[in-house]
Amino acid sequence: MEFQNLKITDKGRIRYITINREAKLNALNKATLTELHNAFSDAFADPETGGIIITGAGPKAFVAGADISEFAGLDVAGGTALSRTGHTEVFNLIANGGKPVIAAINGFALGGGLELAMACHIRIAAENAKMGLPEVTLGLVPGYGGTQRLTQLVGKGKALEMILTADMITAADALQYGLVTHVVTADELLPKAEEILNKILTRAPLALAAAIRCVNDADTYGINGYETEITEFGKCFGTKDFKEGVAAFLEKRKADFKGE
């Protein structure tokens, strides 16, 4: 599939999705969101892809926000539809994907850009990165899951402070708050993301997908995450990967998982 706003590259079992609108600081317009839906759907369905790293083109921005010019003519119904479509087609798609997704935050991650990073399973940042949700300066609130995921990641008090002040935070702050798990130099950012993902990809693929479902259900209203864990734990016993993992452990060798 050809993309106008994304660059897709494969490195072994890692699929790189790079938002390639450097002149616009990789802002998320409707076309880019549509391409992200297609790119992630393809990556999750591709049996050769084990995990995904998403980043932004150039040294300045991961994603500096949404394309505000597209908001100007919207009314209540239009704004509601925009948010709902974004949730369903992109942000929830990523969060609920069965393959690990790492956001490599290489610069500004603001508004929809930070929401995109928060939808990913793991976030690492370059030391020059800046993050924030400035929507209230436009008379808006975060509309792509930002109020919910930021609260889950950093707690209610810090989430409210960040959202209500609209202030940007540094990568060091983000690490302290638990918003990212690692901060490295710009040159080390992608190698660090690959290091983490390659380690993950030595593990059993079906178990990885099950673990993502379990952790997500810990924060899903109306769902008992403990029950999800019990169910997923039991289902793992029916996989060939479980039998291989146990055999490898008992035989003191490296497991050869097939995702079966």
Image (cartoon, helix red, strand yellow):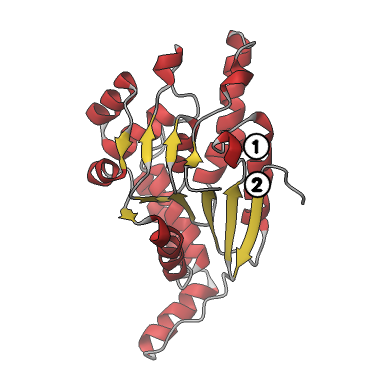
Q: Secondary structure at mark 2?
A: strand
Badge 2, how many Cα within 10 Å: few under 14, some, many 20+?
many
* Label placed on residue 129: none
| Residue at horizontal 62 percent and vertical 36 percent from the top | 89
Quarter holding the C terminus is bottom right
Q: Which badge, 1 or 2, comes first in the chain's sequence?
A: 2
Observer-nearest residue: 70 or 91?
Answer: 70
- Is residue 13 visible in the rendered image? The answer is yes
User: In the rendered structure, which amino acid carries the disc numbered 1?
Assistant: Thr
Q: Amino acid at mark 2?
A: Leu
Residue 30, percent across and down?
Answer: 66, 30
On residue 32, the disc is: 1
Residue displayed at 57% across by 75% down: 258
Nearer to the camera, 152 or 142: 142
Splitting the image into 4 quarters, where does residue 216 fall? Answer: top left
What residue is shown with label 2? 6
Asked which quadrant contains residue 211, the reply is bottom left
- 120 is higher (above) or lower (below) than 253: above
Residue 55 picture location, percent across and down? 51, 49
Q: Is residue 35 left or right of residue 221?
A: right
Q: CA distance from mark 1 to mark 2?
A: 7 Å
Image location of residue 70, percent across then percent down? 63, 20
